[in-house]
Amino acid sequence: MINIGLLGFGTVGQGVYRILQDKGEDLKALLGLEIEVKSILVRDLYKERVTEVPLSKLTLNPDDIVSDDSIDIIVEVTGDVDLSYRIISKAFERGKHVVTANKAVVSAYFEELSHLAEENRVSFLYEASVAGGIPVLKPLKDQIRLNRISRIQGILNGTCNYILTRMTDEGLAYDEVLKEAQKLGYAEADPSSDVEGIDTMRKLRIISTIALGASITEDDIICDGIDKVSDLDIELLMDRGMKVKLIAEARKVEKGYQAIVQPKALPVASYFAGVNGAYNGISMDGNYSGTLGFQGPGAGMYPTANAIITDVIDCILETQKKDSPLRGRKLENRNEDIAATYYLRISGYDRSMDNIKEHLQEVLHDEDGEFAFISKEVKLYQLLHMLAEFEDKPFSLIAIEQ
Ligand SMILES: NC(=O)c1ccc[n+]([C@@H]2O[C@H](COP(=O)([O-])OP(=O)(O)OC[C@H]3O[C@@H](n4cnc5c(N)ncnc54)[C@H](OP(=O)(O)O)[C@@H]3O)[C@@H](O)[C@H]2O)c1
């Protein structure tokens, strides 16, 4: 018998519980052992839940679970960073494997937790933390054994992709789609971590650290979101055959690496332009593998729970190495060299904003103080420096994929 301690019984926790109930016999046949969810951590014992569970399994005390020697694997799906950091660390020290979907805790403590798991010879698996239901970390860890990954890119946030897709397909305004997305449960009541790119940045932190073999932290990544993208921006770029997507990207460059999350305009026929709705997509370029692409549901009860239980099976069958996948290469951050052609729209533009002229390639729109243009190739920092001179003028900046 394998006992699981489940931390959290929300969308994902209930998905894990349900699949384990439904597939109990099949898993027993596969593993030669039964899997039992022994205890479940929640905040409120008496909350109404759609999944029935005996009250005796629920606890308010995480230490009950992590101190229980009969529990072999901790599945952490609370979303609470401080609590999960403390419990995951303690679980490793007590010889328990940990599976988590919590990108915030993996991103904040990636190196420390990876080394602690390795030291204690236990598995630390977090497939569901990046791109929810898409198996991408396991293939990535396999590929880095042979390949040098020169670039990894992704659409990693379903909420942003859902909003941009509806703005593009239906010509709707950002606020209108956001409100609807909140009603439908695609966006949180407080959407800031999604729409400001923070959630995407944490996921890039995780995949880029594995892919490039260097410690790339949250502070090493330039981060922008979709909250300034308007329907006008989308329309003007669509007229030029381009779709706007929030793209996370880390690449190896001659003297180090660059890592950025930003809205990008992509040719409509490109791979990422075809990743729509709440779906996520990832591509990685290996020197032997070539470009590999992955696409699928980036969230949701069953896709995410499926990724978690696949990790649980790997813990039991020991089908993933317990060594940390992090390689600690020393690479220099070269974000200051990032350069591209940009789409830039400034609200409240007036003729005195002269320093735009040196960057201007083509004006797309000039009406009622809304000025939108395509720049010449320019360094991002140079453009941001210029924009800082306009102080409180709202702007929208979108990189153009050549
Ligand atoms: N939802 C998705 O599709 C998805 C996809 C990929 C990754 N994830 C990640 O998976 C994790 C869980 O997401 P979710 O959508 O399932 O969240 P959720 O629906 O909000 O559920 C969170 C659960 O954790 C419990 N909890 C939270 N903080 C706690 C604390 N301090 N002490 C005790 N219990 C606590 C809550 O207890 P109560 O029930 O008593 O309130 C609830 O059962 C997050 O890290 C998220 O980023 C989610």
Image (cartoon, rainbow, N blue to C red):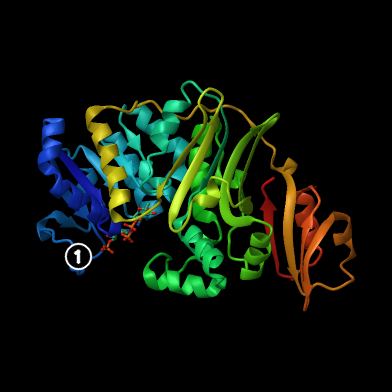
Residue 173 drawn above or below residue 289: below
Rendered location of residue 85, percent (x, y): 38, 46
Q: Position of residue 299 (x, y in %)?
A: 37, 54
Cβ(mark 1) to ligand 1 < 8 Å? no
Residue at numbered disc 1: 50
Front residue of 121/244: it is 244
Drawn side of residue 244 relative to residue 306, left or right: right
Q: Residue at x 59, y 52 (%)?
A: 268
- Along the line of sight, the residue nearer the viewer: 368 or 95: 368
- Describe residue 27's horizontal placement relative to residue 192 as left or right: left
Quadrant of the image occupied by residue 237: bottom right
Residue 205 shown left or right of residue 255 in the figure: left
**Image point (68%, 64%), residue name:** 236
Identify the image quadrant of the N terminus.
top left
Taking the image as four quarters, which one is ligand 1 found in?
A: bottom left
Horizontal placement of 191 versus 121: left or right? right
Residue 47 visible in image: yes
- Which three-letter amino acid code belongs to the residue tagged 1? Val
Which of 44 and 166 lies nearest the eye of the viewer?
166
Indicate the position of residue 401 as horizontal and vertical percent values.
67, 47
Q: Is residue 1 visible?
A: no
Q: Is residue 169 above or below residue 28?
A: below
Q: Residue 255's x, y, as percent?
A: 70, 29
Few, some or many residues within 10 Å of mark 1 (<14, 14–19, 20+): few
Q: Residue at x 17, y 46 (%)?
A: 20
Q: Secondary structure at mark 1?
A: loop
